[in-house]
Image (tube, helix red, strand yellow):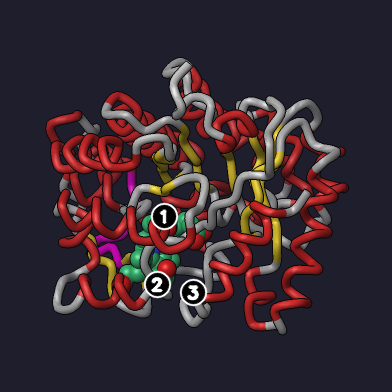
Amino acid sequence: MTALTDSVFLRAARGEEVSHTPVWFMRQAGRSLPEYLKVREGIGMLESCMDPDLVTEITLQPVRRYGVDAAIFFSDIVLPLKAVGVDLDIKAGIGPVVANPVRTLADVEAIPDLTPEHVGFITQAVRNLVGELGGTPLIGFAGAPFTVASYLVEGGPSKEHAKTKAMMFGAPEVWDALMRKIAGIASAYLKVQVDAGASAIQLFDSWAGALTPEDYRTAVMPHSQRVLTEAGELGVPRIHFGVGTSNLLTLMGEAGADVVGVDWRTPLSEAIGKVGDRGVQGNLDPTLVFAPTEVMLERAAQVIEAGRAAKGHIFNLGHGVIPSTNPDQLKRLTDFVHSYA
Ligand code: CP3
């Protein structure tokens, strides 16, 4: 067995015993790191995602600085859409903006399926990274169909996802075609990353918490299930994450996750009861980094203790690192999780 397959992160993801709880942070690359802001100077977000050397450097930065147990590939959930030719940009301080939002079946059919040729720069970046990372696993990722659909239909970030849900409720044939289109792209995109050497994947359904369990189960889950099933056939552990998903955790597990990501609003003990025989990932409130260090660490200890009841526990924040986070706090947090007995 190589050091990589025996890493604490992959062991925990498979529900095996570990010497300490593994830790990484969603959105650990970019955002708060001064070394990130420096290499990104004057370079657009999408442009940087398409430059394998830059992607390699940015992905490695938090691994070097914090010594986290996994790297997350530096990219974005809308990158595969850009790669197949959808006219979109990631605007600083706003997020993804789509020039021509998807409204009709013709709009859906105009989006090409993704082939490995669309994303040669991803293959290159993953290969570089796996070489550099050695025994540290690389997590590949994709946006889940509902969350990606929200950007495509709204045309940009949204709180209510009203146009998206209006399509889901009112135009089921367009909705179904869109979800199948995105699921196919996500699945092909994950396969590219795993084929190039990523050793786990995370499916981000960040905005699924906007749905009732019944709407999730009938209109969304089958499509996420397809992505997770196809990823499972690649032989890597699958993490399935969403925000505000307390009432969806059971279904998100059943969709085919090995590990269910939990935000900070749901106590880990409650989440563990809901996901059954699977691992959990999470779930420290990301604002605790702004509290006094001893308060942050006391809460982290509670998360670690709660995680012991799970089939496997990967320590993380309950959502992404907040941009104004002091990296020194994340370093202290990482060291604390590693040394916690
Ligand atoms: O650790 C990492 O940062 C890895 C790379 C990563 C990015 N986006 C880079 C990024 C990952 C894993 C994502 C996923 C992503 N993107 C999600 C799911 C995770 C989550 O937060 O729920 C979502 C919903 C998006 C869509 C998105 N992209 C938004 C809403 C925004 C704007 C807000 C923000 O995060 O700054 C982006 C832009 C984005 N994605 C940036 C980065 C580094 C900022 C780009 C810039 O510099 O302008």
Q: Does the residue labelled 2 lie within 8 Å of ligand 1?
A: yes
Q: How far apart are marks 2 and 1 (CA)?
A: 14 Å
Question: Up-down: is 184 above or below 273?
Answer: above
Q: Give the range drawn in magenta.
A: 97-104
Q: Is residue 112 above or below residue 290?
A: above
- Tell me which numbered mark, 2 or 1, is placed earlier along the sequence: 2
Nearer the N terminus, badge 3 or badge 1?
1
Q: How crowded is mark 1: few (under 14 residues within 10 Å), some or many (20 or more)?
A: some
Residue 20 at x, y percent in the picture: 68, 42
Question: Under 8 Å from ligand 1: the CB of mark 3?
Answer: no
| Side of 31 where 339 appears, left or right | right
Up-down relation of residue 267 to residue 333 (above or below): above
Calculate the distance from the C-alpha at mark 2 to the C-alpha at mark 3: 10 Å
Residue matched to label 3: 327
Q: What residue type is labelled 1?
A: Val
99 relative to 110, above or below: below
Give me the C-alpha separation between circle 3 and circle 1: 12 Å
Q: Which residue is drawn at 58% across and 40% down?
A: 240
In this view of the protein, which residue sits in the foreground, 210 or 341? 341
User: Which residue type does callout 3 highlight?
Assistant: Pro
Question: For residue 53: magenta?
Answer: no
Which one is closest to the eye, mark 2 or mark 1? 1
Q: Which residue is drawn at 24% across and 32% down?
A: 113
Residue lying at 76% horizontally and 77% vertically, measured from the top left? 294
User: Residue visible at 74% across and 53% down?
Assistant: 340
Local secondary structure at mark 3: helix
CA neighbours of label 3 inside 10 A, class few (<14), some (14 to 19), many (20+): some
On residue 31, which mark appears? Answer: 2
Residue under label 1: 63
